Image (spheres, rainbow, N blue to C red):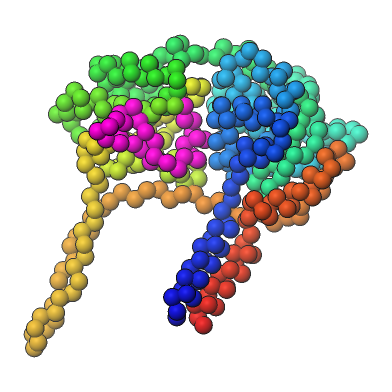
Amino acid sequence: MSAFRYYLSFVLILTALATTISAHNITDILKGFPEYSQFSSYLTQTKLADEINSRQTITVLVLNNGAMSGLVGKHPLSVIKNALRLHVLLDFYDPQKLHQISKGTTLTTTLYQTTGNAPGNLGFVNITDLQGGKVGFGSAAPGSKLDSSYTKSVKQIGYNISVLEISSPIIAPGILTAPAPTASDVNITALLEKAGCKTFANLLVTSGVIKTYEAATSKGLTVFAPSDEAFKAAGVPDLSKLTNAEVVALLQYHAANGYNPEGTLKTTKDPISTLATNGAGKFDLTVTTAGDEVTLHTGVGASRIADTVLDSTPLAIFTVDNVLLPTELFGKAPSPAPVAEPVAAPSPAPTVAAPSPAPVTVEAPSPLGASPPAPPGETPVESPADAPGSSENSTADNASIHVNAPAFFVVLVTVACSVLLS
């Protein structure tokens, strides 16, 4: 086979694989709609955009600038984030589905429910198909009213993301009046001790690194705290043999500048700098995602993010399964030894193959989670209340922005195979 045919086949196969990857970007979608600029801006500021982009199936209930002004007011960013979480549904709703709700009403889960801070039904939204072709939205908390209604469709991309405009904010009882902790109010060590990270908390205090954490919190901080069990695991170095400077660097390595909630970590492609990063060493972390699981890699080992201790702008605290060991202090992970090729003895002596060295175990990063293809279905038909032309544009945009076509994949692979065999 010629080099050109081999190259062509390789490109076709890669192209086919690429078509199965699902992706969407909510802020890119909203760029074409200036009436939602304020809504989009707060999605970026609160990092909710990253959470939305990391989800496979989602519906965003957007508010125009006029409706947003009534929601934002003088509330702190952490309160606004919780309010906006109620406008992100963990299911796909297009105009057709809104008007075909079983029994006319349903409760659907929102991002606010995933925080663990929404007791009862506070993390759910009530969607009800009303008379006259209207659809109402409201908090699922008992006694709440359907204060908002469906206005129009903005965009649908396959069965991955749907963007719908509603008339006014969905407000759960107490969500705007709940006290929002400020950076100075948060007791980091107390939160760590309660989360089962007493060893890590004590090290922060005795080393003085806790002051570095507290000083960085006002501008944004993300903490990766090893559990007490992590310090007892085999392979963890004896910290008493480290110099004071090395202990400080190790503890600073467990925190990153900036507010990085889990959704942001899932969409992070570049290495993350830590508080230990300086001119003498990178001291950075890389991130891989498999489904909902997020893993941090140091170059020496890996650690899964186990739980969220706090997610309140501008501070995020996570527990991790293992102590994070930077290569700058503990060296790089061992590389596999080369396998010796068989060596033949001079004739007429029999050929003797040199023994292969014992295998060396190395850390392999967690594979990126593959997005399943969208289920087949016809393009939803807009209801009379929808904006003109939004349905027609949806199919075209789906083809140009979000390709998820298993059939197309099969065709391309078939073509590639035929070229390989010719």
Residue 219 seen anywhere in this rendered image of the structure: yes
In this view of the protein, which residue sits in the foreground, 156 or 59? 156
To which quarter of the image does residue 36 belong? top right
Q: How many marks?
A: 0
Q: In which quarter of the image is the N terminus?
A: bottom left
> How far across and down, in percent of the image, does residue 256 sit?
38, 29
In this view of the protein, which residue sits in the foreground, 359 or 167? 167
Residue 85 seen anywhere in this rendered image of the structure: no
> How far across and down, in percent of the image, does residue 388 sit?
84, 42
Asked whether, in this view, residue 149 is left or right of residue 402, the answer is: right
The part of the chain drawn in magenta is: 259-286
Which residue lies at the image location 58% right of the left edge and 40% below the top edge? 53
Magenta highlight on residue 269: yes
Main secondary structure type of the part rendered in magenta = loop
Query: In the rendered image of this protein, does residue 128 appear above or below residue 68?
Result: below
Which residue lies at the image location 59% right of the left edge and 19% below the top edge? 79
To which quarter of the image does residue 341 belong? bottom left
* Residue at the extreme right of the image, as rendered: 132
To which quarter of the image does residue 410 belong? bottom right
Asked whether, in this view, residue 231 is left or right of residue 267, the answer is: left
> How far across and down, in percent of the image, does residue 245 sit?
20, 24
Which residue lies at the image location 11% right of the left edge and 84% below the top edge? 350
In this view of the protein, which residue sits in the foreground, 173 or 221? 221
Magenta highlight on residue 108: no
Asked whether, in this view, residue 341 is left or right of residue 90, the answer is: left
Asked whether, in this view, residue 119 is left or right of residue 228, the answer is: right
> How far across and down, in percent of the image, does residue 105 sit?
78, 34
Which residue lies at the image location 31% right of the left edge and 31% below the top edge? 277
* Residue at the extreme bottom of the image, as rendered: 348
Query: In the rendered image of this protein, does residue 79 appear above or below residue 149?
Result: above
